[in-house]
Amino acid sequence: MSKGILVFARNNSHIDYTKQAVFLAQRAKEYLGLPTTVVTDSKDYLLTEYEGAEEIFDQIISIMPAETPGIKTFRDGALSSKNLQWKNDSRTQAYELSPYDETLVLDTDVVICNDIFLKCFEQQNDLLMYKDCVDITGIDRGNEFIRVSDTSVDFYWATVVFFRKSETTKTFFGLIQHIQENWQHYANIFQLSSTLYRNDFAFSMAAHIMNGYQSGNLVKPVPGVLYYITDKSILWEIDGDSLFLLLEKPAHEGEYTALRINQANVHVMNKFSLNRCIDEQ
Amino acid sequence: MDERLAKALDFSNYMVTLNHQKRILKERFREQSIFYYAGSQFTVNKELLTFVSMLIDKGSDKDVVLVDDNEIPVMIDDLEAFQDEITDVYFSAANEFFTRYEKLKKNRSVEKLTGHE
C-alpha cells in the first residue's frame, strides 16, 4: 500500500503557506521518511520561489483559486492582528486528491519533531483524528476545543487526519463535502455561533452523523500527543527538534511566559511567527 | 518599582515557567508510556503492569485477550514477552521523566529552565 502525507497550501496576501509546506515536507522526510504531496493554487509561485520544490515534493497538485474565501483574524501574539483571506475549503477533497492508499493529512503549520505519526500506518483503523490536543499554555478555554459550540457535538481537530482509502472513508469525505456545500444549513442545525466555514467543525459534524447522530468511535485518536499554541502565543525559535515558545498570559495581554519543548509535535497557529522561524533556518 | 516587589515578580515569572515545563514533562511521560503492539495501543500504567503480572502469576501466559486503549480486543500470544516489553516502556519513560525532572529542579532562572541564555 502506498503511503504519504498530503498538505494544502493556499497563500493569502500576508501568509506564505507554500513556505510552510516546503518546511513540513522536509521535516516529514527527515522524521518520518514519508513523501509529501502538496495541493496548491500557487504552483508557479512555489516552483519559482523555492528552488528544488519539485524534488522536495512527491507531487504538486494544482487547484483553482478559492472563489469566495472567508475572512479571518490572524494574530501575531496578543497585540497584533490582521484580517486576511482564509482559503480552507479544499481539504474536503483530500480523499479524491490524495495519490496514496494511506494518507496523513496535515496542516502546514504542524511542526514535526518526532516519528510518532508513523504509528498511524501500523494500526488497523481507517480513520484517525485528534479529539484531545494539549494546549501548551494550560489555559482553561472552556468548550472551545471540546465541542463545536456550547450546545453541540464533540469537537475533532482536522489538523491531523489519517485515512486509509475504503468505502467508509469515501462515504465520510463525501458527507463532509455535502456539509460544506450546505454549510449555512448545518451551521444552524449544529448551533454554531459563527457561520464561517471551518474544517474542524465540518469533520466533527460528519463524525457525529456517521456515528448515528451520537458520540461514537468511528474516528479513533491519532497516536501520540499533538500540542498546540494559539496565535496569541509566539514561536520564537526552531532548533532541530527543540522549540522555544513565548506563551500568552491571559490576564496580562502582551506579556509572555517562556517555554522550551523538545521532541514534540506542535501545531503553531501563529503563522507569522512560524514563517519567521522558517526564514531563520 | 519597589525592589521587594520586583524580586517577587521575578520569582513569580520563574514559578510560572517552571510549572509549564513540569506540565510538559508530565505530558511527555504520558506519551512515552504508550506501548504499540500489533496495531493496537496500550497505555502502560501501574494498573496494566499489575494486571499482566497477576495473569502470569495465575498461569495465564499464552493466548490472552487484552482490551486496548481504543477498546479493541487484542490477542496476546506470549504474555511474558508482552510483560517484558511494557515493563521496559514504563521504566524507560519513568527514568527519562526522573532525569529531566531532576535537571529542571536545579535550574534557578527562566533562562536556565528554557535553555535560552
Image: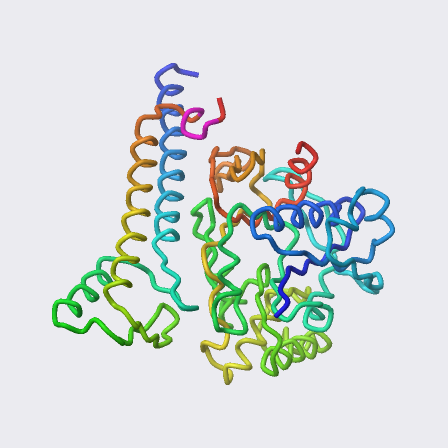
Report the colour scheme.
rainbow
Q: How many marks?
A: 0
Residue A95 percent coordinates (x, y): 68, 72
* Horizontal side, residue A216 vs residue B91: left or right: right
Closer to the camera, A135 or B94?
B94
Residue at screen point 47% across, 40% down = A262
Query: Where in the figure is residue B28, as x and y percent of width and height?
Result: 39, 47
Question: Is residue B56 magenta-colored?
Answer: no
Of B105 and A121, which appears nearest the observer?
A121
Q: Looking at the picture, how far across and down is residue A270, in whole percent? A: 62, 44
Residues in magenta, as a range: B111-115
Q: Main secondary structure of the magenta part?
A: helix
The quadrant where residue B73 appears: bottom left
Q: Nearer the viewer, residue B115 or B23?
A: B115
Question: Relative to A194, is A216 on the left or the right?
Answer: left
Q: Quadrant of residue B114?
A: top left
- Name, please, the residue furthest toward the bottom: A212
Most extreme residue toward the top, as rendered?
Answer: B3
- Residue at the (62%, 37%) spot, across then down: A79
- Give the percent coordinates (x, y) of residue A209: 55, 81
Indicate whether A130 appears above or below A274.
Answer: below
Specify the quadrant that holds the N terminus of chain B: top left
- Please give left or right for residue A12 compared with residue A173 in the image: right
User: Looking at the picture, does residue B7 appear above or below residue A33?
Assistant: above
